[in-house]
Image: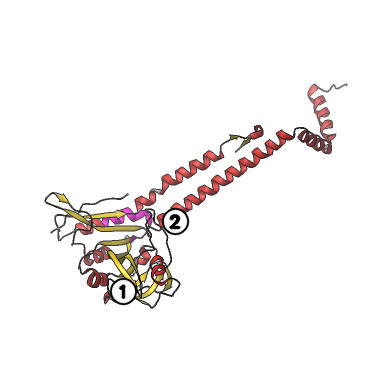
Amino acid sequence: MLLIAGPQSFFRGKFSKVVESVNYAALLQSALVALLRNKMRSILTVLGITIGIAAVICVVAIGKAGQARVEQQLNNLGDNFVWIEAGGRAVNGVRTGTHDTKTLVVADAVAIKSQISLIKSVSPNVDDPVQVVYGNQNWHTSYRGVSPEYFEIKRWYVDQGAIFSQDDADRAADVCVIGRTVRDQLFGVEDAVGKVVRVNGLPCKVVATLHPKGLSLSGQDQDDTIIVPYTTAQKKLKGITWLDDILCSATSQDVVKLAGQEAGLVLRSPPLRLGEIFRLRQNGLPLRASDPVQNLIHGFLNAGARPVKLPGGLGGKLTEHITIPQSM
């Protein structure tokens, strides 16, 4: 019986023979000849590929660096930071600014710490501008009167020495911790720990210097500061019994807003203090402000990854305000 192969079998056999007879060396030689014959087109093609790859690498590197910088600045705001500041009041219809009330006291900070499980650290805060003098050097800066928990809340790390203790705060000790800018202005290359500086005329022993943080998001020098126990600031520097702020740290970022709301409830509780306002700031909202920044960076990266026309014809691939009744 005679079998006749169909056209499909015939062409399959022919194709197999062609593949087997391919001379790869000849193909390579032919490609090189074509490249050398069209030198300008070859150079433009290589240049286009190089520019495309370099552009994508640069866009990715710039985007990652920008994102890391934003996250670092937001991280410097504090550890799940909840900020309660004394507000203003209306006097004959004229509203005063923040820090114009006198009813935010240490007892409020104690109540927040003891009654709110979502808040892990609390520090009273008293601050004011100050002139600091050491020997024949002086510098105008600002001080903060806080408790030792402040350094954990604001993520301050010690460069030299050791921060003051709760015992120092209890007895209003004349000690201080200074930022890098203050240290450089007063001491230069000299070791500052153990030296005595005059803070508005009050002799204070420097017990530690802080690791530098640099500029804040608003451009303020965070290292231009001097930190003392809050009792020292109240009794010996400012002469007051109330607080300017209460600084808190929530147990996690997810509960920052809820912790702030519970702090507001504690401050609303009796005894009522009518006629004044507290302001509650939460950095949960500023932290979420990083989402649009990240979206912008991602969009920038995606735009850089889209096909573009290259030489040679190739394509390359915040703040929440809570009004709290207070008494005069």
Mark 1–mark 2 Cα distance, whole angstroms, equals: 34 Å
* Residue 223 is a magenta residue: no
Task: Confirm whether residue 141 shows in the render.
Answer: yes
Residue type indicated by callout 1: Arg
Task: Provide the residue span drawn in magenta.
Answer: 249-262
- The x and y percentages for residue 197 are 34, 74
For the point 21% across and 52% down, the residue is 323
Q: Which residue is mark 2?
A: 72
Of all residues shown, which one is farthest toward the left?
92
Label 2 SS: helix
How many neighbours does mark 1 have within 10 angstroms: few (below 14), some (14-19), or many (20 or more)? some
- Kind of residue sitting beneath label 2: Gln
- Quick one: quadrant of the N terminus? top right
Marking on residue 198: 1
Q: How many marks?
A: 2
Q: Main secondary structure of the magenta part?
A: helix
